[in-house]
Image: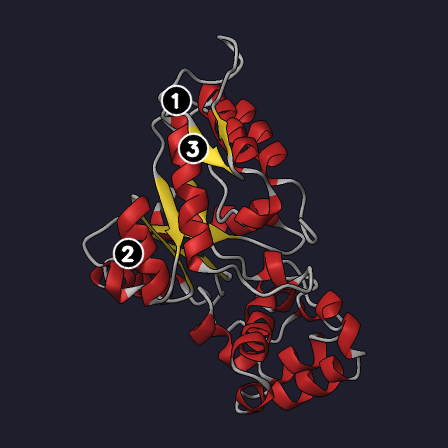
Amino acid sequence: PAITSDVWMALALAADRTSTAGLGPAVLDPSLRHPMANATATATLARMAPGRVAVAFGAGFTGRYTLGQRPLRWADVEAYVAAVRGLLRGETVTWEGAPIRMMHTDGFVADRPVDVPVYIGADGPKGTAVAERVGDGVFSAVVPNDAAAGRPQALLRYGTVLGPDEDVRSERVMAAAGHAVAVVFHGLYERGGPDMVRAFPGGATWLAAAEAIAERERHLVTHEGHLVRLTDVDRAAVHEGADLLTSVSFSGTPDQLREKADAFATAGVTEIVYQPAGPDIVGELARMADVFQPST
């Protein structure tokens, strides 16, 4: 919420303007909304787009770091998801020491039980175990979750379709996918520390720019523009490390992207969630769709 528009408002608009597209937030940070609020939002969307809704919950990466907080404990995520799922079934659940239940008048939201798939945003063993207990599948980021093989697995990917011999440092590519290199620096810095960032091309440049900002306010810029655009902190470092683009993102020629998708399927991925970016979202979506559903 510190970076993009409100997810439920955007989904409501999407539900009103589409008839077949699958819809859902990926992924929700439990610390940002009471479980009743997310249960009600889910049930409202399910009423607007019956049969097309799925939701995902995680421990909070950017959603927490942008607020100066660490990710949640997985035990807290599990308790939250269990509460939301109980509410959607029409049950009375206990939260913060009190019984709560969806008490909506008929017509306000979908009738209970609201049966929607629930994914857990997990890349490691603890999150995957939570998915086994309270989820229907796994929502992974960047690389497939090997431990989730045999279960529904959505994989978040971002990038752009490259033209023949297109320069990865071109203005178009940097605007559409340069953020995919920047997020490598962001993630390594938060999870591995400065030394891991320095090991990558452009990492030292990014580190110098980020650490020039006072530590108390560094989180306000470290993830600024996350998966949306390059910032002043990112730009020079990403240009320096741009050769990483095809390996760290879903960027490449049509043939290369089809090969990547086949490899993901072999690894157990059942759905690719593609996020476009840059000034030409419609064009990015159209080019990516054409890779997998060539126009005739």
Mark 3 or 2: the one toward you: 2
Image point 23% across, 58% down: which residue? 268
Quadrant of the image for the C terminus? top left
Quadrant of residue 282 in the image?
Answer: top right
Residue 252 position within the rendered picture, expressed as x and y whole percent measured from the top left? 44, 67
Q: Which mark is residue 140?
A: none
Q: Amino acid at mark 1?
A: Gly
Q: Nearer the viewer, residue 190 or 280?
A: 190
**For marks 1 and 3 on the same chain, the one whose residue lies earlier in the sequence:** 3
Q: Secondary structure at mark 2?
A: loop
Distance (Cα) linking label 2 and label 1: 32 Å
**For marks 2 and 1 on the same chain, the one whose residue lies earlier in the sequence:** 1
Q: Nearer the viewer, residue 246 or 114?
A: 114
Q: Secondary structure at mark 1?
A: loop
Residue 12 position within the rendered picture, expressed as x and y whole percent measured from the top left? 57, 28
Q: Amino acid at mark 3?
A: Ala
Q: Nearer the viewer, residue 166 or 78?
A: 78
Whether residue 282 is situated above or below residue 139 in the rendered picture: above
Q: Amino acid at mark 2?
A: Val
Distance (Cα) linking label 1 and label 3: 26 Å
Whether residue 39 is situated above or below residue 48 in the rendered picture: below
Verify CB contact (< 8 Å) between mark 2 and mark 1: no
Quadrant of residue 14 in the image?
Answer: top right
Q: Which mark is residue 269?
A: 2
**For marks 3 and 2 on the same chain, the one whose residue lies earlier in the sequence:** 3
Residue 48 position within the rendered picture, expressed as x and y whole percent measured from the top left? 49, 20
Q: Which mark is residue 90?
A: 1
